[in-house]
Every structure is written in structure tokens, then in C-alpha cells.
Amino acid sequence: MTELGEDRYGKQAIRLVRVVKDGPRHVVRDLTVGITLQGAAFGASYVNGDNALVIATDTMKNTVYAFARDRLSGSIEAFGRVLAEHFAASPQVDRATVSIREHRWERLAAGGAPALDAFARDSSWTRVAWVAVAGREVTIEAGIEDLALMKTAKSSFAGFPRDPFTTLAETSDRIMATQVRARWRYVSPTIDHDAVFERVRATFLEVFAEHDSPSVQASIWIVGRAVLERHPEVAEISMALPNLHHLLVDLAPFGLDNPGLVFVATTEPHGLIEATVRRS
Amino acid sequence: MTELGEDRYGKQAIRLVRVVKDGPRHVVRDLTVGITLQGAAFGASYVNGDNALVIATDTMKNTVYAFARDRLSGSIEAFGRVLAEHFAASPQVDRATVSIREHRWERLAAGGAPALDAFARDSSWTRVAWVAVAGREVTIEAGIEDLALMKTAKSSFAGFPRDPFTTLAETSDRIMATQVRARWRYVSPTIDHDAVFERVRATFLEVFAEHDSPSVQASIWIVGRAVLERHPEVAEISMALPNLHHLLVDLAPFGLDNPGLVFVATTEPHGLIEATVRRS
Amino acid sequence: MTELGEDRYGKQAIRLVRVVKDGPRHVVRDLTVGITLQGAAFGASYVNGDNALVIATDTMKNTVYAFARDRLSGSIEAFGRVLAEHFAASPQVDRATVSIREHRWERLAAGGAPALDAFARDSSWTRVAWVAVAGREVTIEAGIEDLALMKTAKSSFAGFPRDPFTTLAETSDRIMATQVRARWRYVSPTIDHDAVFERVRATFLEVFAEHDSPSVQASIWIVGRAVLERHPEVAEISMALPNLHHLLVDLAPFGLDNPGLVFVATTEPHGLIEATVRRS
Amino acid sequence: MTELGEDRYGKQAIRLVRVVKDGPRHVVRDLTVGITLQGAAFGASYVNGDNALVIATDTMKNTVYAFARDRLSGSIEAFGRVLAEHFAASPQVDRATVSIREHRWERLAAGGAPALDAFARDSSWTRVAWVAVAGREVTIEAGIEDLALMKTAKSSFAGFPRDPFTTLAETSDRIMATQVRARWRYVSPTIDHDAVFERVRATFLEVFAEHDSPSVQASIWIVGRAVLERHPEVAEISMALPNLHHLLVDLAPFGLDNPGLVFVATTEPHGLIEATVRRS
């Protein structure tokens, strides 16, 4: 006999630009929204082909655009909550999850002042929010993605075990480069999301810059612990940090030394270190 | 106080080509391998910056290449198991997981016969395997990715609820297109992996082609149940199927009807339906 | 003083699926179409901001969809010609170029026979056509893209000069792997495009498989010359072949030799060889 | 009879990170370099399979890394010139072209001051240089890529012709969004490349922000003319600007108007406008 296990469905990659036109100084909000619904009642759509309770994913998309008209005035966390609560209010929905990625546009300069209505996209990092609503329970997470970081000093890797397949030399001075995926859960949904996000981001970057790293593993711990220690709003933080190896080029055949100066940047293969740091 | 939560680390995107040269008729194996280790003992590398037990990810890469020399003669599941058991044998490893994607190369024709040593890559789908070893427990999963499928008939979507944000028309005749991500777990690790994989794949494609689909949800159930019913080796199967909408073009402004003939293929936004079907 | 130099404009990435429903056995045509117009009269749109002669790119898109209803029954070259001649008929257009990429869908099996209405995309290569119409002159080119090929024998690279920066060893036995971009121009626009394309493709693959390659450069010449010699319909052929290096892994640290068995597949950096072979 | 037409070869995607360590304040240069050689003498490598004059692309790569050790201290244009002149000095080379993309890393903050050795990548735009050396002739071009821009006002599109396939409404208020590819040629190779580049970039952004756009075509002209008028160092400038359409969402079904507030951001299909503005 077969049965349905875990299931979920929704709409992804809803691309939305909202221009705020309160006067000549425009503001651009550029979001990619995803909606995911779960509920025991949806089982019938799988097992019986019965769509009577299936909120169409096209309807989800329409709802996002309609809500963007009047309810997207603050943080992406707030907008995600409005959406998640809307969908969670349907009786067949046990849990509604909304993910929002915000693509940042910076104001150009015009005539020596910030332009009113012209922007350049800043692709250097992406702010992400996840809001889950299940009954009266609201869980909000925030995160940073698409952020490439590099340390050219204070990064080592030594003291690791050697077996017959180990050829890596110990190093007390290497490049550490990564592409950050960080995600943290807030203790409470009712905080000043924009302000706290900025403070967490500042801590993350500052500790990344300052710390001595004996490994990517230790870096996750050091950065994560600092976030928790400085920001009581954060309950736990998870990171997935690829180790984007920069290989020292052997210049000896050309009669040159290479004391940490010239590197090949690579993406394949890469280390991948993932961990969560949380309050105990 | 802070503590370490879940953690794992390893090497990803190890790109490996193994040419089998038993005589003039060569065989190409083209794999992307990933290694992931977990273990309570690794906590010290995070919390204390102590690498004494950290198997370097560079060592993992070397091991994959060395093992490819003599131990990659059968299925990717078998190769994954050899690797996973190797790493799981280290006392600090509680669980070793190996993922392998196999990129398929087809023999070209030369002089009216299959070429001995020339190949074209078939990118139409990718076979994937995951092998996890924890102590004596071995879990093997297989899957298909990068497979785009389309039904131009026998796909409908109707009977769904309408709310103030619903504009989608009911339809008894639509294009259903998706990019398959399917993954199934085997009841036992000791089966003929190549043969069973091919049989599961054949069932998947045949049932996809033949069934009447009232929704992507129902398609997952119908295909998944058939896989379980026909293949006792499979314990459960999960799918993540995007609904890649094909929008009927309104040709009325040009004096033309469009009875299901001309469509815009889109990727954004897309539905995403995920579910597991298992034995009960 | 400033002036306008070369200019062109149009619509790209028009995604079109046409389902042919002459009876229960459906046929899928999946195209990506691009339209580019050139004409001296368009200068006013740049220099004077005068759109009086600017065919909107939205109109181009509409035209493609409308024409797909009734005029897409044969080769992509024929469809491209219909479109290019339509746009070239506007007096402000000196030259209209249409590019079409066809994404191939293969019929699935159902009940032991080819399915009537279910398909899997074959991503292993893409057929491309370019049609340019300028007045009464019609130029048609065809090509292959997204085709990955590999030779595991009959590929060498030796006899090249050595300077102080040369470290590469000569080799009489290497893997040659590439991703083909080939494009050829037909002597005349009035040929059986589907048949000739298939014959050229067969020659390309067969000669690639059979020839001995002293370099990628020579391979282009050998394959290109064969296409011209066997296919009088082809006036010239151009190729851009990346040399996707497969690096022999040094297994000596692990006590193993590696006589051309285990390779690292790489994409960065890669050689890139481009040349045209033509009738003299 | 067949003959060789145009040909060129070289190495692409050479990924190079150079850390400048003159004291504790490090500087990161992150480049992707490409080398392309042309020369009549290379014909023999195609036609005769004779590699006697073929500078190996691996040697090109080595040269780039070796030169990065001591000769990468200024602009990418200067580094490109050193490389191009090196390769052009070989008698078999008629023309050597070097392309360099610089990936920008910004200094993080640490302890309230700019960090000495920690950086975040700024992916918002990429500076590109092309240097061609043929005998004594040196041609230098510079450019900007990967720069996304948006105007939320002062962009219209009206007055275009209407034919039976035209459905687009005229608009005096639309979003104009694009991803810039701009490339300009300098009158002379001996200028202060870093300074001039920054001035050209500033002009480009400022004029983009300030101008009234009746079409993307006119925007290219207006921006290009300003670059030429303000910067005598520039001989001509070419742009390829996709028109990344932002479609106004129809909110009427939900009882809402949408006066230029809520848009769907799209990439397929897109307009593509390409033109050169030059001194006459």
C-alpha cells in the first residue's frame, strides 16, 4: 500500500517592482516573492485529484501583486507577514511560508545631488526574509545571500590529520574567500526589522573582517557567536560558507618566487561548511 | 550562552572523468562528486579552532581521484558506497554522505558503426545517487534531475476555489511542462543499481506519458504510486516539479483564433509542487 | 561634432511553443526567435527622438506569434524567411535579420509505442538558423550550438615552440573536449533545409569522430573541409571551439600511475579557437 | 577547392587574483584575462597540422600569471598593453588582443576604520578593457558591463507606427530598465586610464539619470553624445542596451487602479538596441 508523505506547493519567482511615488522623489522596491502552502487537507488533491481546496498558484501571484499596491510600505518581513497571514487564514492551510528576496537599487547622482527617479542596482548582496505562519504562531527569519567576502590575511589552516591521501600543506597565511549564505531566526516577530537587520549585517561584516580564522568552521562559530552576543533579537543563526579556494601559482619555472602574491581563483571543487550557532 | 547546533562539512563539485581503456573501445565516466561528513567530534573545530580531527576537504578530493583509478567499475551507487564507507571508517565520522551526478556521453557513429573513442554528451537528463553510511547502516538513494517533460494533452486544471484574487480560467486542455527533480530511496543497498534505475526511469516516463493529469499534484501521486507498485526495491519516492506555465497567446487582435496552438513558454513565475509517496 | 555610427535594434528571446494538432498525434515546435532591423531611416529615432518610423519591438513579438499560427509548418529557415521578408517589406528597413533556435522535444514511449502527446526535451544540441533579407537578397545560415563532444584517443598536441613561459608537456595522447558553436552559410536559400542540415550534422559528427587531431586548429580545418567537400550547398563554415582542458591527475603521491585514466574536467581557463573554412 | 578564411585563437577565462602587500594594508586585484592572437603564419596549424609557430594557450596563461607578479601595478589597460606587446613581439603574430575584466572588491570596515585585509566584492558593475597591438599600432578600448540601471520617470515611448500587429499603447510614463554594455575607444593609448574611466563613467550615469528619454535609441544617442562632448579622450562609444520591460499589472479585477505603481519585471522577451556614436 502507498500513502502520501510530506507535501507542499506554491508559487515561486514572482517578480515584482513597486515604485513609491509620494512626490517627485521615487523609491523602488524590487522583490522576488515565493509562496508555499502546507495542509493535511491538500492530500485530496494528490490522492483523489480533487482540486476543491487547492488555492491556485495563479491566485497566489495575483494576491502578491494586489497586496503590493497598498501594503508594501515597510520591511520585507512585514510584507511577508501580511501575505503569510492572508494565506494561513484559509481553513485548509496549516502553514503558509513566504520568502522574499529584495534586490537593492541605489539612487544615482544627478546635478550633484541624489537623483529623484534614476537608480543603479547594487548586486553585491541580497537581503532575504522568510515568514511562516501556522495558526497563531509566526516565525520570522532573515538572511543575507550573494555576498562574496575575502580575507587576505589572518586566515590559516594547520594541525589537521594526515593520511595516505593527504597532500595539502599546512599554511599560516592563505586567502579565505567565500560566498555567504546566512540565515537567522528572530526571537520575536515584533521587532524593528530594518534596523535589526542592518545591525546584524554590520556585526557580521565587522567580525568577519577582524577575526583570526584557523578554519572556515571556526569562522562560522566566531561570527555566529558575535551575532548572538550582540543582538538579543536573534535566537539562532545558520551559515553555509563555500571555501572558494585561491591556489598559489607556482612561479618557480619562471625564476620568480610567490610569497602570497599571485593566485588562481577557483570555484570547482570547493569546500562547503554548514553550521548553526544558537542560544543554549 | 551560545552552543553549536547542526553542522556538516565537506567537498563539493569534484569534477572527475575516468576513461576506461580495456582495449580500443573506450568508455567514459563523467562524474561530479560531493562528500559531506558529520560527527560530534568535529565540534571542536568550530568551538575551539582545533583541526586535529578535521579531515581536510583537499584530502577528500584526492581520495575521490585515487579511488577512481581502480574502484570505479560499476554503478555510481557502488562507487559512492566505497567512498562513503572509507570516510565513515574514521572514528571521528558519525555519518558520511556521498552524492554523485553522472553526466552521460553517447558514442558517436564512425564509418557506420559506433565510434570506439568519440562521444557526444547527452544533457537531456542526469542520473544522481546519494549514499549515506553511519556505522553499519547504509542508505542508498537514486534520482533523476535536469529532465524536461511536456504533455500537450491529457492535462487539465479545474474545480479549484475562486476568491477575490482568482482570475485563472478553468481548463480541460492545457500544456503541462516541468523540469523533473525526482529522488527515491531503496529498501536495501544490495540491488542491481543500474538495472533497477533503468526500470524506475522507464516507469516514470511511461506513466508520465500515459496518465490523465487533473493537476501537477495528482501527477506526482500517480507517477509515484506506479513506481512503488511496480518496483519493490523502492521504499519511497519524492518529487519536486515546477509547473512551467505555457500561456496561450491572445491572437484575437490579429483576427485569429488560438485553440491550443500557440503558447508563450515562461519560467517566471512558476508553480512548485513537492511531495513524497511512500509505502504505508 | 558627433554622428551616429552603426546601429540596429529589435526583439530578442521571443519564446514560442507551437503545438501542431492535426489529429491525436501532436507535434511540438519550441523556438526562441530574435528579430533585428537595420535602416538608414532609423537614424532619426536616435538623433531626433522621432519614433515615426520605429516598428515597435512589441509589434515584432506579436508578429512572430501571429505568424506561428499559420506559417510555421516547415523548417526554421523557412519560418525565418517569412518573418524576415515581412519586416524587410517596410520601406524604412534596409535589412531584416531573424535568428531562430529550435529546442528539440523527443516523443516519449507509451504502451510500447511512441506517445502521441508526451515529450522529453533533448538538450544535447540546438539547431540554429539565421535569415537576412536586404531588398531582394536573401542569405540563410544554419548552425549547431550547445553540443559537447569528446575524443578520448587520436588527439595530440606537440611540436609547438617553447619559450621561458612554456611548461606544457608535448602529448601524443590527450582528451579533446569541446562545446561546438558551428555556423555555415548556404550557397542558395532554396534548398531542402531539414535534409541538408541533417546531412551536414552527420558529416560533422562522423569526421569529428574519425579524424586524427594534431590540434583543435587542425580539427576545425579537417571537419570544415569535409563539410564543404561533401555538401555543395554549403558556401562556408565557421566554428568557435573552446578547448575544455581535461587535466591528468597526478596519482603518484598515492602510489598509483595514471596512464590516461583519471582526469579533472575544467572550464576555466579554456582555449578558444575560431576559424572559417570557405570555398576558394 | 577550400581555403582558410578568418581565424584567431587564444586563452580565455584566465582567473587571476593579485594581492598587493606593500605593508599591512593589502590591495586586491581580481581579473579575468583573455588573450587572442591572429597571424597569417598560423594558417599552417590549421591546414597542415603544423604547430611549429603555435604559441600554446597554456603558455599564454603562464605568461599572464608571471607578469602579474611584477607588472600589474596600475590600470588594467596598462597591464593589457604589456601583455599584448609581449605577444605581438613574436614574429608570427600580426595582432594580439588582450581583454581584461576587473572584479571589484571593496574594503570592509573593522573597528570603525577601513579594514586592512578584508573585502567584499562589489558586483554592481564590471570594468572592462581591450588592448590590441598590431605592429606599432596600439588600440585601447574601455567599457562597463553588468550594470543594471532604471529610470522611473522621464521615459516615454510614443509616436511609433501602428500596423495590424501593433497592440502596444503609447506611453508618456514608463519604467525604463536596462543592463548596460558600453565600450568606448580612446583617441590615444597614452592617457591616465583610471582617471578618464572614472570621468566617463560619471558622465554616463549622470546623463542617464538626468535626460528625458523618448526611446532607448534616443537615450543611447544622448548619453553617447555627452560622453564625446565632455571627454576629448574618447573617439567613439558603442552601447548594447536591452530594454528589460516592466509590465504594468492589471489590478482592475481586484478593484484597484494602478497608476504606474506595480510592475512585473521581465527578461524574456526583451528589446535590444545597439548603436555607436562617434566623432564626425
Image (cartoon, coloured by chain):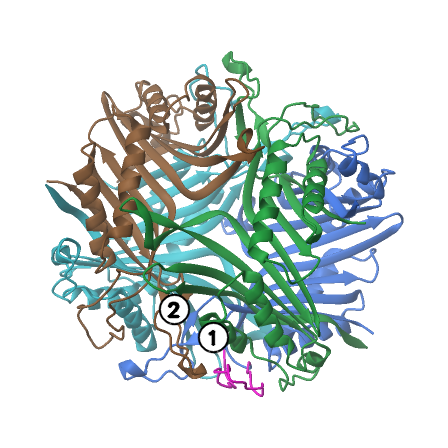
Chain colours: A green, B blue, C cyan, D brown
Please name the predominant secondary structure of the magenta segment in the image. loop
Q: Nearer the viewer, residue D180 or C95?
A: D180
Q: Which residue is mark 2?
A: D261
Residue name at image x 82 percent, y 56 percent = B189
Chain label for disc 1: A
Residue name at image x 55 percent, y 17 percent = A258
Q: Nearer the viewer, residue C66 or C45?
A: C45
Q: Nearer the viewer, residue C169 or D244?
A: D244
Q: Nearer the viewer, residue D55 or A247?
A: A247
Same chain, labels 2 and 1: no
Please say whether residue B15 is visible from this viewpoint. Answer: no
From the viewer's perspective, is residue B77 above or below residue C218? below
* In this rendering, position of residue C132 left or right of residue D251: left
From the viewer's perspective, is residue A238 above or below residue D104? below
Q: Quadrant of the C terminus of chain D?
A: top left
* In this rendering, position of residue C155 left or right of residue B205: left
Amino acid on which the number 2 mark rests in the picture: Leu
Q: Which residue is mark 1?
A: A66
Q: How many marks?
A: 2
Amino acid on which the number 1 mark rests in the picture: Ala
